[in-house]
Image: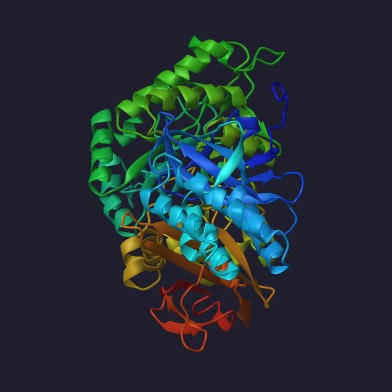
Amino acid sequence: MTDGLRFGRFPITAVSPVIENGAFAAKSIPCADLEVGATVFREGHDALGVEAVLFDAAATERQRVRLQPQGSGLDRWHGIISPASEGSWTFRIEAFSDDYGTWEHNAEVKIAADVDVEVMLAEGTALLSRAAAEPARLDADSKTFKAAAAQLADATLSVPQRLGAGTSAAVKAAVQRRPIKSMVSVSPSYPIVVERLAAGFGAWYEFFPRSEGARKDPATNMWTSGNFRTAAKRLDSVAQMGFDVIYLPPIHPIGTINRKGPNNTLVAASTDPGSPWAIGSADGGHDAIHPDLGSFEDFDAFVNRAEQLGLEVAIDLALQAAPDHPWATSHPEWFTTRVDGTIAYAENPPKKYQDIYPLNFDNDPDGLSHEILRIVELWISHGVKIFRVDNPHTKPVWFWEWLIGTVNAAHPEVVFLAEAFTRPPMMHALGRAGFQQSYSYFTWRNTKEELEEYLTEISHESAAFFRPNFFVNTPDILTEYLQYGGPAAFKIRAVLAAMGSPLWGVYAGFELFEHVARPGAEEYIDNEKFEYKPRDFAAAEASGRSLAPFLTLLNRIRKEHPALRELANLQLHRTSDPATIAFSKHKRRVLEDGTVEKDTVIVLVNVDPHSAREGSVHLDLAKLELDTFNADGTFTVDELITGQSWQWGAENYFRLDAHAEPAHILHIRR
C-alpha cells in the first residue's frame, strides 16, 4: 500500500544536517559532535521513538543514538553523533512505535484508576517476553525482561509489586540500551564527509617571506629581499606561539608591466618589489618561484623545517595573472578581451588593479581547468597540503566543485581555504562546493549585538557546510576597531577569534599592535603588499611591547581543551552589560571504559576597548551539563588567563577592565 508514497508509517521530515537534499555532504572532523535533528510525529497518542544511525564507508553501523524531544509540542527531535575517523560516512533517521513507552504510560494511568488492571499486566508480560526473545538483545537484558515478565504474571504478588517489576530501574535501563519497538520507518541516508583535523581546527600565521630577513643598505637605500632561507629562521618563533599553519602570500615571479608602487601607487620605481598577487613575468608563472626567494630546493627546505616544528605550510592559489605572465601570450583566450583588443585588467570599483588580469573560464574551460589542476598537483608534490585561495568568488562555483573534488579524490588530506569576502549565498555555495574553510565577516563584527548574531549564525545555521576562519587582520584589512582601540582592542579581537571559532588567523604585525592606516582607507599605511617590511619581533617582546605571549597562551588553551575544537557547540549566555558578551563551549566524550569526560570553557569578553565594564552574567546551567556542585550550590571555575579560581553559580558578578584584562576564559573544574 505504501509503495511510491513519500511518507512511511511515521513521517520523518526536515532532517539535518542535510545539504541540498543530500547532494553535498555535511562536514565534520574525527570524533567531533555532529548535531542531528528531524521533525517526526505520529497519529494518536501512542509513544514514538526516534534514533539516528551512523554508518561508515563500508555501510557498517557504527553508532545508534536515541534522539530526544526538543521543546514541547514541536515534534522536533535532536541528538549527537560522532564519526570516529576520516572518510565518507552516512546517517539516517529511524522512527518507531515505542511499545514499552506506550505500555508503561497506559499501565500506570489505568492501574491507578483501577481500569483494565489484569489486561495491562498481561500486556506488559507479553511485551517483555517478546523483547526477551529478540536475538540481538544482550543476554543480561533478556534475563532482566524474563524475570520482570514472570513477576508481572505472578498473581500471588500485589498489583503494585507486579507493576513495579515491569517498570523497575533495571527494566528501564535495558530498554534505554535497546528500545522495544515495532513498525520502524526509515529516512533516506545522508552523506557526511569527515576530514582531517586541520580542515576544521587550526591557528594560522601569515607572513611575507621577502620581508623576513630583508635588508636596506643605508648608503644606497637599496633593499635586499628576504628569501626562504632567511624566512625559515622566523618559523621557530611562529611555532613557539602555538600556531599550526604558516601561510605565505604568492611566492611566484611578479609582473613588471603596470607594477604598483608603495601604497598602491600607479608608478613603481625599478627597485619596488611589486604586489605578489600580480603573478607572472619572464621568470615564469604559477609553477615558478620568484628568483629573489630562492629555488625549489630552498622551498623544500623551508617546508621541511616547518614540518620539523609542527607547522604546515599553506601557499596562496591566486588565479590571476600579471600582464607579462606567460599565459598572456600563450593562452590569451584564458582572459577577457575588450572591444578595443586589449585584455581587461581587474577592477572592484572604486579599486583598480592595473597590474592584474583576471581569468575567464568561459572561453576554454577544459584547458584552463586542467592547467590549474596541474599547478596544484605540482605544489602538492612539494609538500603543500593547504591552499589559501584568493578571491574564489570571482570564478565559477562549478570550477571549484570540480577542482576540489578531483584533488581530494587523489589527496584527501589537502585543505582549501576560501578568501571570499562577498555575499553570503556565494560564500555558502563555495563551502558546499568543497572548500574546507572560509574567511568570514567576523573581521567587521565588533559590537555585542553584531557578535551574538554572527556567532549564532555560524555555529547553528551554517556549521554543517561553512567553516569560518576568524582572521583578526589581513594585509588588506585593518578595521577602525584596531586603528583606534589601542592594545586592548588587539587582545579583545584575539580572544574572540581564538575562542569563538576552531579556526583563526593572524597576519604578522598584529602582535606588535600595528594600527596606522592609510588615510581614508581600511588598510595599513606602507602596505606590505607593495614593499618590504622587516620587523624586530624580538626587541618588542623583550621590552614587553608584544602580544606574542598572550597569543601563545590562547593557542595553548585551544590545544588543551577539546571543547574548543568544535563550532556547533557554541552557546550564548545573557549578560546585563550591553558591551559584554558571554558564550560557552561544551564537549562530552564517552571513553572506551564507559566513563564520561566533560570539558567546558566559558568565555566572557568586554568588547569596549576604552573602558571597564561590570555587570552580571546569567549562565544556562543545563547547557553546561553540570552534575556536581559544592555544598552551597556553586561550582569551581579556573581562570585560564590569570590562574585564579572562583566559585560560580547561575548568576555571577564580573568586572572587566579593557586596559588590564578585558576577558575571562574559564574552565569548569569537574
- Percent x, y for residue 604? 55, 72
Give the vertical position of 403 relative to 199 (above or below). Answer: above
Can residue 151 be seen in the rendering of this structure?
yes
Is residue 502 rendered to the left or right of residue 613? left
- Percent x, y for residue 510? 46, 59
Q: Colour mode? A: rainbow
Is residue 2 rendered to the left or right of residue 555? right
Q: In what quadrant of the picture does the N terminus appear?
A: top right
Residue 312 in which image quadrant:
top left
- Percent x, y for residue 589? 41, 57
Give the vertical position of 422 relative to 567 (above or below). Answer: above
Q: Residue furthest bottom?
A: 632
Residue at (57% x, 36% y) in the render:
431
Residue at (60% x, 53% y) in the render:
122
- Percent x, y for residue 23? 60, 28
Q: Nearer the viewer, residue 567 or 131?
A: 131
Q: In what quadrant of the picture does the C terminus appear?
A: bottom left
Can residue 514 be seen in the rendering of this structure?
no
Q: Residue furthest front?
A: 156
The tally of labels here is 0
Q: Nearer the viewer, residue 57 or 377?
A: 57
Residue at (38% x, 66% y) in the render:
553
Q: Nearer the viewer, residue 235 or 70?
A: 70
